């Protein structure tokens, strides 16, 4: 009999990969290069290869990845960055941190990703970047955004791919779909480490150089600082953990796709539950498996009574958050964001979710 259902089961993952992970961590303890050890460069090379992107720069978190990307692009006070209000706070936080204004555009009600058709109306002469979020593990409509940016010239497209590492869009991998891609290795993300970590991807050599320098206090060489930077390196031990997990990652992504599809099959035909929608030209790595219902509180209470863990990603959209209400700009109506924020909830989802556990979750939901 399995233990209590986990929302995300990192223990099962460790049990399967223990030998590789332990060996990788011990190699770091033996060589002792805890900062910028050889595993960091090895990881950057392998992630660049995986995503098909020339330059990968590892950093200390997904939030830091987004922040450093904005800094490297020279975005600051007086600038505007268009993004989704329906995301984890870090997306807008970094825009505010560099002194720019987050401009919120409404989402598509089925994918919960930014509605590309509404983006152009939000563009002003101050727009320097668009930051789509590939929410729940499904890439946003990157081709449309790239085309829009190309028409306007100097607008960068920064994919917040914190939830979508491993997903594809028109056969290409998330993080490699636009001028800059940023991801997170927070433990519960599709590819996670055992602490904080992240990475930035770009094909632009000048931007890559700026990102590398900003990551280490803006230094061009030791103790010679040409830019304002941050202390944003990823630890060698965290890089070692990701390297070990990368060996099993293709298998895990396959499991995620299968388990997500099985949820969709098992839950189809319940007319009070709106299922997540995946566009035909992309895959979703299901960082979250997120449904929509009218009476969320009642549904969550019933699932809790049956020991099914759930979560809400995200209950309060960013334009309604006290810290952002007054500093953001809203473009058009955010009615769909308000609507989905009141209806979404996520079910347990990870590569080790067994069929019988999934059946138990679905049975509880149907009841
Ligand atoms: C997790 C997450 C981040 C931040 O990543 P951290 O590594 O936790 O800093 C940013 N954006 C989104 C959409 C996320 O889900």
Image (cartoon, rainbow, N blue to C red):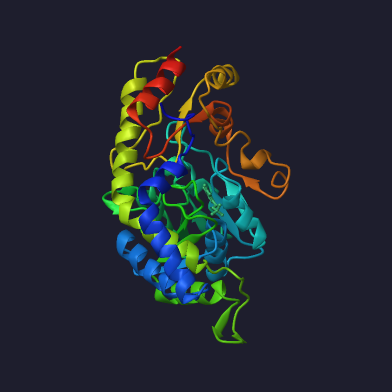
Tell which of 196 and 321 is nearer to you.
196
Tell which of 20 and 357 is nearer to you.
20
- Answer left or right for 336 relative to 53: right
Rendered view: 272 above or below 258: above
- Which residue occupies 38% across, 26% down? 358
Give how far across and how far down residue 334 sits, in percent: 58, 36
Give how far across and how far down residue 124 sits, in percent: 56, 55
- Which residue occupies 56% across, 18% down? 305
- Which residue occupies 66% across, 48% down? 328
Residue pushed farthest left? 171
Which quarter of the rendering shows the N terminus? top left
Give how far across and how far down residue 327 sits, in percent: 70, 50
- Which residue occupies 32% across, 48% down? 169
Rendered view: 63 above or below 290: below
Rendered view: 36 above or below 186: below
Give how far across and how far down residue 308 sits, in percent: 50, 25
Q: How many discs appear?
A: 0
């Amino acid at each position: 009999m399995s233990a209590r259902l986990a929302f995300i089961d990192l223990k099962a993952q460790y049990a399967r990969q223990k030998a590789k992970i332990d060996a990788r961590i011990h190699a770091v303890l033996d060589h002792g290069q805890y900062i910028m050890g050889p595993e960091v460069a090895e990881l950057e090379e392998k992630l660049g290869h995986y995503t098909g992107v020339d330059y990968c720069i590892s950093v200390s978190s997904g939030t830091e990845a987004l922040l450093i990307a904005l800094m490297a692009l020279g975005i600051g006070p007086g600038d505007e960055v268009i993004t989704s209000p329906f995301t984890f706070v870090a997306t807008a936080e970094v825009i505010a941190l560099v002194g720019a204004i987050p401009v919120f555009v409404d989402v598509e009600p089925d994918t919960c990703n930014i509605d590309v058709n509404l983006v152009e109306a939000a563009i002003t002469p101050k727009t320097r970047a668009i930051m789509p979020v590939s929410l729940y593990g499904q890439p946003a409509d990157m081709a449309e955004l790239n085309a829009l940016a190309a028409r306007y010239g100097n607008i960068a497209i920064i994919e917040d791919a914190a939830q979508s590492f491993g997903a594809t869009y028109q056969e290409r991998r998330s993080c490699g779909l636009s001028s800059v891609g940023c991801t997170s290795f927070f433990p519960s993300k599709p590819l996670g480490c055992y602490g904080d970590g992240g990475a930035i991807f770009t094909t632009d050599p000048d931007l890559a150089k700026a990102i590398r320098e900003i990551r280490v206090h803006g230094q061009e060489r030791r103790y010679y600082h040409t830019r304002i930077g941050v202390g944003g390196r990823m630890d060698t031990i965290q890089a070692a953990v990701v390297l070990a997990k990368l060996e099993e990652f293709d298998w895990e992504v396959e499991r995620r796709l299968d388990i997500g599809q099985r949820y969709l099959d098992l839950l189809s035909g319940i007319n009070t539950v709106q299922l997540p929608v995946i566009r035909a030209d992309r895959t979703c790595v299901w960082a979250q498996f997120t449904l929509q219902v009218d009476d969320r509180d009642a549904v969550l209470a019933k699932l809790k009574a049956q020991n099914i863990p759930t979560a809400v990603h995200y209950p309060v959209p960013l334009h309604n958050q006290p810290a952002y209400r007054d500093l953001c700009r809203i473009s058009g109506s955010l009615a769909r964001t308000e609507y989905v924020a009141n209806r979404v909830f996520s079910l347990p989802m990870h590569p080790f979710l067994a069929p019988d556990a999934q059946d138990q979750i679905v049975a509880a939901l149907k009841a």
